[in-house]
Image (cartoon, rainbow, N blue to C red):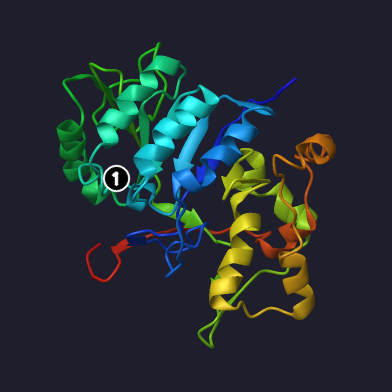
Amino acid sequence: MKYKFENKVEFYITNVCNLTCENCNRYNNYNFRGWQRWSDYADIYRKWSEHIELKNVVIMGGEPLLNPTVNDWITGLTDTFKCGIQVLTNGTRLNKTPGLYDALAQTQQHGGPHVGCVQISLHNVDHFDELKQNIKSFLSTPVEEYGTAIGVDLPNNAWGSMYYSMRDVNGVLINVHLANDFYNASIQPTANGRFTLYDSDPIVAHEKCGFAMYKCYHFIRGKLYKCGPVALMPEFDEQFNLDISDQDRKLLHGYRPLTPESWSWKSQRWIDNLDQPIPQCKFCPQNFTNTKIWPVVKNSKTQ
């Protein structure tokens, strides 16, 4: 019998982003490199579909619309897991991604609440009016809009953002949620120009962790991780050489994700401990502070 994930599962497809948002919890505000081609992992995810059933799939990054194969990810994951797809983006490339609308529209055949959905994280409210016009240009014959940004209540039969949402005649939905403050990320710059991690009580850090609270499980490069940081911190270390001890580096790289091959003997223990802290939780903060962000387009001074 397949294991069904009731909460969303996030497919992280690129480290690359065009914005610098302080305390980005996937560290994309730095020159973090690397992206994943769908065709390189398609067969692995087909093997995964033999073991698991997904209800809500989120494609994200980085900025996923900077991945040259993002449309392949949308149609590929839809066909593989037979569920709707939500693309989480900063919205700046909505009309600069050829084929995106058609890929989203094709997901309608599988039904579900996240069919053909783009979720936009609005990092600066001053950009809303421009974003709203871009959304209208992207969609085909809008039929419904609502949200606090325009003073229209959420319909009883609809789901989505309370900030702003628009749906078109083909069922493609754009949700905008306000994300203009971030809490402190696990990777922090040091005074000597390097980067380091926290040294927290892992139990306390896990208790306060948003990844744990909202059960944000991550697929990255065909492997399933408890959360995004435990997958990305080692990759960041390989590129930037974190300022940490040898003992912490060994622990950092010691997490073993699930693979289709290890599912048969490792999955039950992994599932049973999903809500428990892992040793690597020590690298995340245990005292969270939300800070207003002012995103800047990389290689420019434009906010």
Considering every residue shown, the one lying at the far top of the view is 157
* Residue 274 falls left or right of residue 119: right
Quadrant for residue 174, please give it.
top left
61 vs 98: above or below: below
> Residue 253 lies in what quarter of the image?
bottom right
Q: Is residue 90 left or right of residue 215?
A: left
When the figure is inspected, residue 288 is found, relative to residue 190, above or below; the finding is: above
Q: Residue at x 28, y 23 (%)?
A: 146
- Where the N terminus falls, by quadrant? top right
What is the x, y in percent for residue 219?
59, 44
Q: Is residue 144 left or right of residue 13?
A: left
Please identify the residue farthest to the bottom as the structure is shown.
Answer: 192
* Nearer to us in this view, 50 or 138: 50
Q: Nearer the viewer, residue 108 or 228?
A: 108
Residue at horizontal 45%, vertical 44%? 38
Work out which quarter of the rendered image holds the C terminus and state it. Answer: bottom left
At 35% from the left and 14% from the top, the residue drawn is 155
Q: Which residue is mark 1?
A: 91
- Where's residue 246, x and y in %? 76, 79
